[in-house]
Image: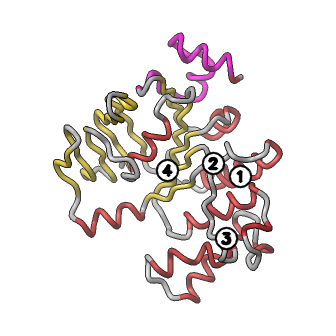
Amino acid sequence: MSMIRTENVCKDFGDLKVLKNVNLTVEQGEVVVIIGPSGAGKSTFLRSLNTLEKITSGKIYIEDELFYHRENDATVSKMEKEKFADMLLEMGMVFQQFNLFPHLTVLENVMLAPVNVRKKEKTEAEETARELLEKVGLSDKADVYPSKLSGGQQQRVAIARALAMEPKVMLFDEPTSALDPELVGEVLNVMKDLANQGMTMLCVTHEMGFAREVADKVIFMYGGQILEEGTPEEIFGNPKTPQAQQFLRSVL
């Protein structure tokens, strides 16, 4: 079953066409990594999947059901309100910036949404939060405030917080780009563990080593379009378009 499928997704900002007929399928349990130069539309595409950016036109399917359909900047159809809200909760997202609440401890940050949004009992939410903090290697930081953590630790808390909502798919928007180089590895390791556990993941990243090692499928975006799609071996070993060849020469 496909977890996410897009058909002819377009996004315009005024006269600027940022996404042009993007068609992509992400299967359940698949790790898809999107690469490409800055300004290619990668982050806009990711943010459009959970409607943080409203697409101009196109269709988005979640679990093979029509989630959202817009044409000419107007909504044609979307899932009924409750189901739409539930589906949004199934998509966990991790951003470049960690966006933790500074006045809450690490544990409280991870517990907040399950208690307030999923209406979980505090004891259950705390148990899950502690398990997740152990999973991301931060059980000893449960009672610490975010300001006392390194960037890498804050991003790992952000991942735990997203996982606490028990999403079916995780969207990562350049999760390591705001980190010092020596902290990147600890975040990528958590993402590798998630991939190994079968989490469906769609990642925008500049970390080519991660893409090579973890991706089932690599997407190369350029100028708002998907120019190439294939296995890491195909994309990194034998890029077909001049744009991909030039991009990979510049980053590898």
Circle nearer the N terminus (4, 1):
4
Query: Could you tell me how far apart the alpha carbons at marks 2 and 4 are, in whole angstroms?
Result: 20 Å
Quarter occupied by residue 36: top right
Q: Which residues are magenta?
A: 225-250
Which residue lies under the disc numbered 3?
102
Q: Residue 132, how many percent across, how many down?
A: 65, 70
Mark seen at residue 187: 1
Q: Residues within 10 Å of mark 1 (few under 14, many from 20)?
A: many
- Give left or right: position of 50 versus 31: left
Mark seen at residue 203: none
Which residue lies under the disc numbered 2?
175
Circle nearer the N terminus (1, 2):
2
Vertical side of 157 occupied by 245: above or below: above
Query: Could you tell me how far apart the alpha carbons at marks 3 and 4 are, in whole angstroms?
Result: 33 Å
Q: Is residue 130 visible?
A: no
Query: Could you tell me how far apart the alpha carbons at marks 1 and 3 are, in whole angstroms?
Result: 20 Å
Residues 65 and 87: in front is 87
- Give left or right: position of 69 versus 92: left
Callout 1–callout 2 Cβ contact below 8 Å = yes
Q: Which corner quadrant holds the C terminus?
A: top right
At label 3, which amino acid type do we have?
Pro
